Amino acid sequence: MSARTPRLPESADVAIVGAGAAGLMAGIWAGRGGAGRRIVLLDGARRPGAKILVSGGGRCNVTHDEVDASAYAGSSPHAIGKVLRRFDARRAAAFFCSIGVELEREEETGKLFPASGSARTVLEALLRAAKEAGAELHHPCRVESVTRAAEGFVLSGEFGLLRARRVVLATGGKSLPETGSDGHGFAIARSLGVGLTERVFPALVPLTLPPGHFLCALSGVSAPALLELWSGAGRRLASSAGAVLCAHFGLSGPAILDISRHVNEALHRDAGAALTVNWLPGTLAAELDRGLRQLPPADDGGARLPGPAPLRRDLRRGRQDRRLQLPVGLGERLHRGRVALRRTALRSPRARCAR
Ligand SMILES: Cc1cc2nc3c(=O)[nH]c(=O)nc-3n(C[C@H](O)[C@H](O)[C@H](O)COP(=O)(O)OP(=O)(O)OC[C@H]3O[C@@H](n4cnc5c(N)ncnc54)[C@H](O)[C@@H]3O)c2cc1C
C-alpha cells in the first residue's frame, strides 16, 4: 500500500478494481452518489493513470465535439446509444470543465484537448475529484481474485482481503501492459461468470507488410488515401479515409489505425481478405493514366502533374529520377493497389509509457 494513502479497510460499500480513466470516473460518481458510502479504489500499478498520460500523444483528447454511436466499435449501436443518452460529449466536456480542466477544440479534427496541452492536467484533475468525492485510492494493490460471498464479494491479493458489497471491474484492456492492464481483469470477470467477447485483440494498430514490400521503401512518406477492405468473395467489408503513412515495417497513420480492427477480424475469418489502397481518391483512374502519359520530359520543371500536392511533388521527383519508369495502367494501380498483408498483419503498439 502506498505510504500516502490510508490503511486499507476490511470492508467497503463499493470496491473498484483499477484506477485508470474508467475506474477514477466510477470512483467519482459512486462517491458523489451517496454520502457516507465507503468507496475503495485498488490499483496494481505503482503509478495509476499511466495510460491517460500517453493518450492523444501525451495531450489526452478527452472527447470529440460531436460523438454518436457510429464512432464506437465492440458493442451494439443500441447499447452505445443508451450510454450516450446518459452521458454525451457535451456532458463529458461540461464534466471536465467542472473539475477544472479547460478544454480546447482542435480545428481539423474536432477533438477536445486540455488547454494546457498536457495529459497530466486530466490525470491530476481526476485524482483530485475522486479524492473530493470521498473515494480512497490504494496502490500498488493488485487484485488476484474476486469471489462471491454471502453479502457481496471478497477481493484478495498480496494486500490481504477486502470485503465489498459491490464491485466494479475497471481493469482496462491488454494494451500497454506496462501501465498495469495486463488482461488479468478478463480472468477475474470470467471467474465470476461474466460473458466476454469470443476474441480479444488489439483494435488500433499499424499493419505490417511482408519484408521487402515496395511501400516499406517509401518509409516516411504520408499521403491521404481511401482504404477498402474486401472479403475473399469480393464483398466490401469496411473502408476508411485519411492519412496513410508508409513505414519501414508496413503502413501506419490514422486511416490505417481506424481500419486495423476490421483487417484483423477479416484475416482471422477469411485468408482471402485483402486491403486496397486508393492513393488518389479524388481522381478517376483513366484521367490519371491520361495525365501520366502526357507528362512532359523529365527535365521540364514546369510540368503540370495530376493529384494532390504531396503526390505531385513525389511524381515530379520521380520524373527527374530516370530510374523511375511510369508504367501504363499506373492510374488503376494507384486507385486499387492491393496490399498483400501478412496473416499476422498487426504490429504491437510500441508507444512508451510516459511516467
Ligand atoms: C498509446 C495510446 C494512445 C491512446 N490515445 C488515445 C486518444 O488519443 N484518445 C482516447 O480517447 N483514447 C486514447 N487511448 C485509449 C485510452 O487511453 C484508454 O481507452 C483509456 O485510458 C482506458 O482506460 P481504462 O481505465 O479502461 O483502462 P486503463 O487505463 O488500462 O486502466 C486500468 C487500470 O487497472 C489496473 N489493473 C489492471 N488489472 C488490475 C488488477 N488485477 N488489480 C488491480 N489493478 C488492476 C491497471 O494498473 C490500470 O491502472 C490511447 C491508448 C494508448 C495505449
Image (cartoon, rainbow, N blue to C red):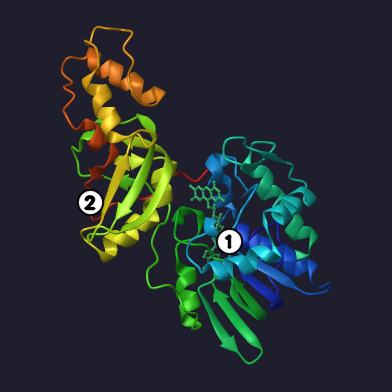
Q: Is residue 96 above or below residue 213?
A: below
Q: Position of residue 7 (x, y in %)?
A: 70, 68
Q: Position of residue 24 (x, y in %)?
A: 66, 60
Q: Is residue 71 above or below residue 162?
A: above
Q: Amino acid at mark 1?
A: Pro
Question: In the picture provided, is 211 more to the left or to the right than 302?
Answer: left
- Which badge, 2 or 1, is on the more N-terminal residue? 1
Image quadrant in which the N terminus is located = bottom right
Which residue corresponds to mark 1?
140
Q: Secondary structure at mark 2?
A: loop
Q: Secondary structure at mark 1?
A: loop
- Report crowding for label 2: few under 14, some 14 to 19, many 20 or more residues within 10 A (C-alpha): some
Q: Residue at x 40, y 22 (%)?
A: 309
Judging depth in this view, the residue of 293 and 158 nearest the camera is: 293
Quarter of image, ligand 1: bottom right
Residue 49: numbered disc:
none
Residue 342: numbered disc:
2
Judging depth in this view, the residue of 183 and 287 nearest the camera is: 287
Question: In the picture provided, is 160 more to the left or to the right than 191?
Answer: right
